[in-house]
Image: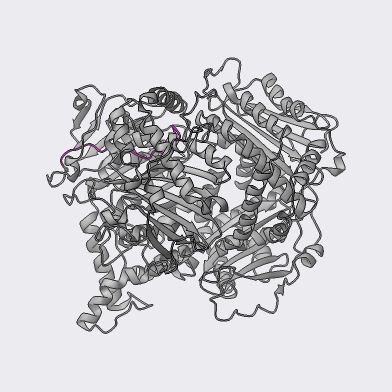
Amino acid sequence: MAKPGGPRRTGPWRTGIARGGGRLELNTLLPKPRLMIEPNIGDHWQEHEAGYKVFVGKIEKPDCDERGYRILEPENGLKVVLVHDPLADKSAACLRVAVGSLHDPTDMYGTAHFCEHMITKGTRPFPAESDFISFVKVNGGVRNAGTSPSHTHYWFSIAPPSLLEAIPRLAAFFESPLFTPNVVAREVNAVDSENKRNLQDDSRRALQVERSLSAPGHPWRAFSTGNIDSLTSAARKRAIEEKWSSVVILPDGDGGPVGRETRRRLIEWVEQQYCPGRMTLAILGRESLDTLTGIVTRLFSSIPNRGLVRRPVIMGDPWTEDQQRCIIFIKTIRDKYEFKLTFAIPNQSPQYLTKPASFLAHLIAHEGPGSVFSYLKNMGLLLSISAGPQTWNRGVQLFAVSGRLTHLGYYNYVKVVRAIFSYISLLKTSTSSFPPCFEEFRELSDIFFRNREKSQPHAYVISLTARLEEDPPAQWLLTAGSLYREYNEEVIKSVLDCLSPEKARLALSARDHENLARGSQITWQKEMWYGTEYTVQKFNSEILEEPIVIPELHLPHPNRFIPKNLGVARGGISTAPTYPACVLEKESLRVWYKRDNTFWVPKGHVYVDLKYPSAGATARHVVLTRLVVNLVCDGLDEVTYSASLAGLRYSLDHHSEGVYICVSGYHDKLLLLLQVVLEKIKNLLPREDRLEVFKEKAIRDYRNYSFQKPADHAGYYARYLVNALEWTPEEKLPEVAAISVEDVQVHHASILSRLYGEVLVIGNFTEKEATALASLVKDQLQYQAPPPKEIPVPKSLIIPAGKSYSYRKLVTDTEELNCGLAFDFHFGDNADQDLRRKADFLRHLIDEPAFSTLRTREQLGYIVATLRWSSVGTTALRFRVQSRKDPVFLEERIESFLSSFFEQLKTMSDEDFSIRRRGLIMKKLEKSKNLAEEAGDYWNQIRSGYYNFSQDEADAAALESVTKAQMLEMYETYLLQSGPLRRTLAVHMISRKLEAALPLPGKVTEIVDIHGFKAGLDSTPGAAPVAPHTPSIPGSRM
């Protein structure tokens, strides 16, 4: 669904001359944007004697954004935005290239993606393959890159003191990449592994089918990820034609003749496509704008300008006439029913003042009264809907309406599609009524922009490079993608005219199409890259008939949730750091409160945790609670959708101890939203038809759970095996079918009869307002407190010291090529602060070396990661791997790595150890970037039962004194096979394609009976609050 202030879907590209070669850009022929700007905008740019152009006008910013901005253009055509944030505790940079998979050579699909992998692996000034990842991670940062159809971006975030050493590394990627021959030959396999990870992903499979059915020769037909066959196809063909000594890429060295030719083609492509005129750069740091300007002009001006068209545009319709008005039936791996209705529309980039496609998406995907979603949902046909422009190309674009269907909706897909066309027809005859809707949309977008808070630095610089690439007027760099400035009925009509049955394509996805595809002689074809089965048929006459008038459909009502009071009172509020305080303690309710004294926005968050005695008693209890929650949310859809458009959010979910509520957004209407949610919870009247819809969905969800990626599934079972209160999807599935409306009513009454509530109120509220909000929970729900001993207390099961266990399970999907491994090293009680901190430090020390060894050099698989996880009473280090290799072999390689890295740690210099320790400390000292992050962090501490609100600050202080000798002792004690306190739990998800699973080592005990295993383990005590935040009010159950 489209909402104002949400992710930008369109943006402007201005016309002009490419800086480097003087060529006229392809998009000079596109319609020019209607700019509501002063005519002398060019006067706001000044030439600098150092050889760059700088914008000197005023850039529109959100009200609470105190950062400094500078936009400049060096002579080589690079576009740059610099952000000076003196309070930043994390710096970041991103470089975006306006070239992606649409620009792959037709005989070497995946080249853009392959380049994204390779360009960061060694440069002339920094030749080591792992230099960049090592430098970033050691200094408390993260990095990544991504390839889309029309662009590729490279980003990192890092501790502020290290920014000026990281930027030269980023610049070197584009000035002097090495493309080291043996690394190229090896990284082909990494791309291949990534593709194999995605082979059973239904969304990718469906998209590739749709792409393969594009116009012959259109780049949209391409296979964007690439694999070893597509990347070496051109080289292998040449090898055969010229009778080279080898016609395949060799596993060692530079890959032989095929490897060398693949490298040559990659470098050739980079020289043809990468150019600073196609690049945008964003850097955020503490440094002054002058310092950052000097760094950029010195390091990035040397990137060679190859005189390429600035932003290549691919024109031409993606479909032929014959490829419209058709249905594509696609077979899925998971059991689900989905539809996607797609139309080709004109390039929306010049229309950023009105954003017609996004405005129409808002109307079509509306969920309030009178919407097509409400109409189809009440008929039991539709579960969800979304709509919006797909800006994968800077020329002709697509507009899609998609959603999830019920089984009944799948059988009646024609009715669903007809209803959507009826609503579009209504819009076409109602354009004169659009101005009030647009004005509401404009007002909301203005509110959202003015009150926009900071985001994570890496996410922000990524978004800035995207905006800069769109080339809006410089003063509107931050607003062009957000604000709806001008109502233009003609451009809205121009998009509406494209949304007709005659110009549409429909994709219908299901695991079994059950003869729904017409005719007995259906031929199922296989898409060549993923092997997805599909068939294509033309629209029947019913879909192409004139849309009917449906009386229930109408335009949205005015939104009663739009905030009016956006003031923030700062008077009398201390700016000193504070933590939530317990302001109310009763037998049935505890309330935590914190006034926002950091972000100063007119917003708030209210979290409510309601625990009841029988929450996780049986699998049936868990299923019943899920259905109660589903039915409550279903009844709230129409009202809360309007609230969501106005910047208010709610969530309602169930967990092993009860149910959870959160409302957040502008404080002015937050009480109203909370009242609406609580009233629906209290007065739920389940309908049998809606219950059947959600029972069907529950059954499908439980069945589909086993089709997760193997690494994800392994991680789930690794947690389940030590969770004292948990039921698997397999255990919950048999309970669903027999549940009746009466069962739901009885369970609903049981939940509300005895509850214990814990509430956090944080934001622009006084303490009096906070207690009133929290008390509303008790007053509205009118529950009684259970005896303290009946309140569920989460606990973990303890793996005994010196024991190693393994649980093995076959992957459900018979076509899944990969195995999954979760290999956990359990340390002990999470409440042991010293142990937990050192476990964090261990993970920080081994994270990059493990990735570089196991993923980059040994090529075990695309997914190789380490993480530290914890729950009540336990903390553990996990190695997570997804690979075509046997999990037993993967464990052996992990053990080998642990042994070798122990030797490296012993010889690590004090300086290197100190740098790594400082990197972790800097991460610990990072502050929340906005109110939502701060609220979430505090709520997680409350939910955990530890209430350790100052944990990060305490950890940072304590880590200062941790020595290498202490870390070596912990490493030897818990990680090495000889360690006296080592305790491991491994979960192996085994592919059915694996020829024969290797036997477990003799020292490992296989878990055959899960319930018997869990019953034989001791459990931890419940969480104990950490001073000084322990509630001190008499009668506390703690």
Q: Nearer the viewer, residue 484 or 238?
A: 484
Magenta residues, as a range? 3-17
Q: Does residue 23 sit above or below 472 in this rendering?
A: below
Tell which of 979 and 11 is nearer to you.
11
Q: Report whether 567 appears left or right of 685.
A: left
The one nearer the camera, 290 or 989, is 989
Where residue 487 sits, quadrant-wise, is top left
Residue 716, horizontal then vertical, whole percent: 64, 59
Q: How many marks?
A: 0
Q: Nearer the viewer, residue 77 or 742?
A: 742
Does 782 lie within the magenta span?
Answer: no
Q: Is 116 rendered above or below residue 900?
A: above
Asked if residue 716 lies left or right of residue 1007, the reply is left
Q: Main secondary structure of the magenta part?
A: loop
| Residue 124 % position (x, y) | 29, 59
Q: Is residue 1026 left or right of residue 498?
A: right
Residue lying furthest top in this view?
571
Image location of residue 666, percent across then percent down:
55, 25
Q: Residue furthest left?
A: 22
* Whether residue 307 is situated above or below residue 251 in the rendered picture: above
Task: Judge whether residue 493 can be spotted in this image.
Answer: yes
State yes or no: residue 12 in magenta. yes
Quarter-of-image position of residue 895: bottom right
Viewer can see residue 160: no
Q: Residue at x 58, y 40 (%)?
A: 378
Instruction: Give the quarter of the figure containing the C terminus.
Output: top right
On the image, the x and y values in percent for residue 491 come to 29, 32
